[in-house]
Image (cartoon, rainbow, N blue to C red):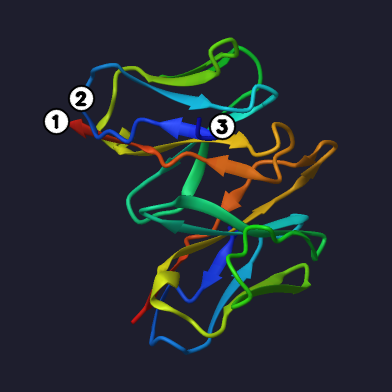
Amino acid sequence: RKEVEQDPGPFNVPEGATVAFNCTYSNSASQSFFWYRQDCRKEPKLLMSVYSSGNEDGRFTAQLNRASQYISLLIRDSKLSDSATYLCVVPTRGFGNEKLTFGTGTRLTIIP
Amino acid sequence: DAGVIQSPRHEVTEMGQEVTLRCKPISGHDYLFWYRQTMMRGLELLIYFNNNVPIDDSGMPEDRFSAKMPNASFSTLKIQPSEPRDSAVYFCASSPRTSGGADTQYFGPGTRLTVL
């Protein structure tokens, strides 16, 4: 299994809909997880951190399933501005934020 | 508050030429990271520094690549000689320190390198 694996998409979703995508990781010792957002031709930016079972921030919910080793990102009431690539990120060594392994990203397009 | 600054933003060069990419981290951040992003391989960590000292350069692809951090506000990534397969977007990121090590990484806008 790859260290971090994501469905590349693209996900084309109508505005206002709910969309979810998963990320699987191989290191069962991983303690922290991150979702980064990357707009086209821009730099990645931290969207959410996940340290326990999950995290919620407005329309965004990240959930962690340690038994199955996957993290999900749920976006409710999607906006046109949510169109971006979402990168799943896991500490390379399972701990510490110095060395991060980035997934190749899931591309999301919100359709008017 | 200024974020991570990178220069140049775009670089087009010919195979065999030396390329130098520059980065100014966010003031007060202890960690600095260099990444490379390509369509095929995604975002890969090349090297990172803690308090100006290189800690892990295992991601540096080969001896043609070198990185330095002479002081807390400046770092360079040099490729000599450059090859077409080095074409990619190179990101610099910096991070403050917490009790557990590095915190959130903040990325610069990147340098888009094309080697002809």
Query: The disc numbered 3 marks a residue on which chain?
Result: A
Residue at the (29%, 24%) spot, across then down? A78
Q: Does residue B26 appear left or right of residue B108 in this picture?
A: right
The residue that mark 2 highlights is A15
Distance (Cα) linking label 3 and label 2: 25 Å
Residue extending farthest left: A112
Can you tell which quarter of the image residue A89 is in? top right
Residue at the (59%, 10%) spot, across then down? A67
Residue at the (41%, 71%) spot, across then down? B85
The residue that mark 1 highlights is A112
Of the two numbered discs 3 and 2 on the same chain, state the one appearing first in sequence: 2
Labels 1 & 2 near each other (Cβ < 8 A):
yes
Q: Does residue B86 appear left or right of residue A68 in this picture?
A: left
Query: The disc numbered 1 marks a residue on which chain?
Result: A
Query: The disc numbered 2 marks a residue on which chain?
Result: A
Which structural element holds mark 3?
Answer: strand
Q: Quadrant of the C terminus of chain B?
A: bottom left
Q: Amino acid at mark 2?
A: Glu
